[in-house]
Image: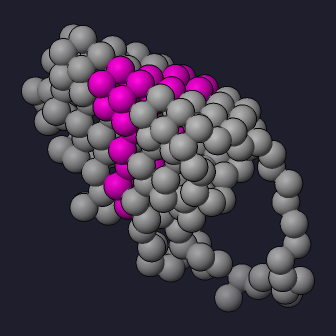
């Protein structure tokens, strides 16, 4: 029934053998393609702040529960990509002013890549390579080459700045 609703009510392009869990939230459904045997688990959020943003899940791509996928700048998860529970992927940014117009960046996650549990991929990333592994809890800020493993979430002070005011 969920596949029928996604395809016929929401206008999502849905391939054969797609699995859709309960409680999926979806914005801009006409911009979403779910290829054969791809899956979205319970509580996945698909979001775009742009009319032009497109989301494509390749054949056999698996997005596990409570994942947040922002496809404002365009997001492609190629064949057999795995996104583990609670991961967050962003393709837009507001810079230092959360009320400013967003800037968009496209992201391609290569075939067979694995994004670990609660990893965060920031909009500065345009490519995660084929067969790459992103460790649990990692904060990804740069492109990742094919076959690489990326771990860690060490923050660092980049600008002392001043306290924000409620102007």
Q: Is residue 71 magenta?
A: yes
Residue at point 76%, 42% (across, down): 151
Reply above or below: 46 against 9. Answer: below
Which of 161/75 is in front? 75
Residue at point 88%, 72% (across, down): 157
Question: Measured from the top left, where is residue 154 in percent x and y?
Answer: 85, 54
Residue 3, quarter of the rendered image: top left
Which of 68/154 is in front? 154
The secondary structure making up most of the magenta span is: loop
The answer to whether residue 161 of the structure is visible from this angle is: yes
Q: Is residue 31 magenta?
A: no
Residue at point 78%, 82% (across, down): 164
Which of 135/149 is in front? 149
Residue at point 40%, 59% (across, down): 106
Question: Measured from the top left, where is residue 70 in percent x and y?
Answer: 45, 50
Reply above or below: 94 against 15. Answer: below
Reply above or below: 13 against 37. Answer: below
Which of 26/93 is in front? 93
Q: Which residues are magenta?
A: 58-85
Q: Quadrant of the N terminus?
A: top left
Q: Residue furthest left?
A: 8
């Amino acid at each position: 029934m969920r596949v029928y609703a996604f395809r016929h009510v929401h206008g999502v392009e849905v391939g054969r053998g797609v699995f859709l869990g309960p409680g999926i939230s979806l914005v801009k459904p006409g911009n979403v393609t779910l290829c054969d045997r791809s899956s979205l688990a319970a509580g996945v959020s698909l979001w775009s702040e742009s009319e032009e943003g497109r989301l494509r899940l390749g054949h056999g791509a698996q997005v596990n529960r409570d994942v947040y996928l922002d496809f404002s700048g365009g997001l492609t998860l190629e064949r057999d990509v795995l996104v583990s529970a609670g991961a967050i992927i962003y393709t837009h940014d507001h810079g230092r002013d959360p009320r400013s117009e967003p800037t968009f960046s496209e992201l391609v996650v290569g075939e067979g890549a694995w994004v670990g549990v609660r990893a965060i991929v920031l909009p500065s990333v345009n490519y995660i390579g084929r067969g790459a592994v992103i460790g649990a809890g990692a904060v990804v800020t740069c492109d990742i080459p094919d076959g690489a493993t990326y771990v860690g979430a060490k923050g660092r002070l980049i600008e002392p700045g001043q306290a924000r005011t409620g102007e």
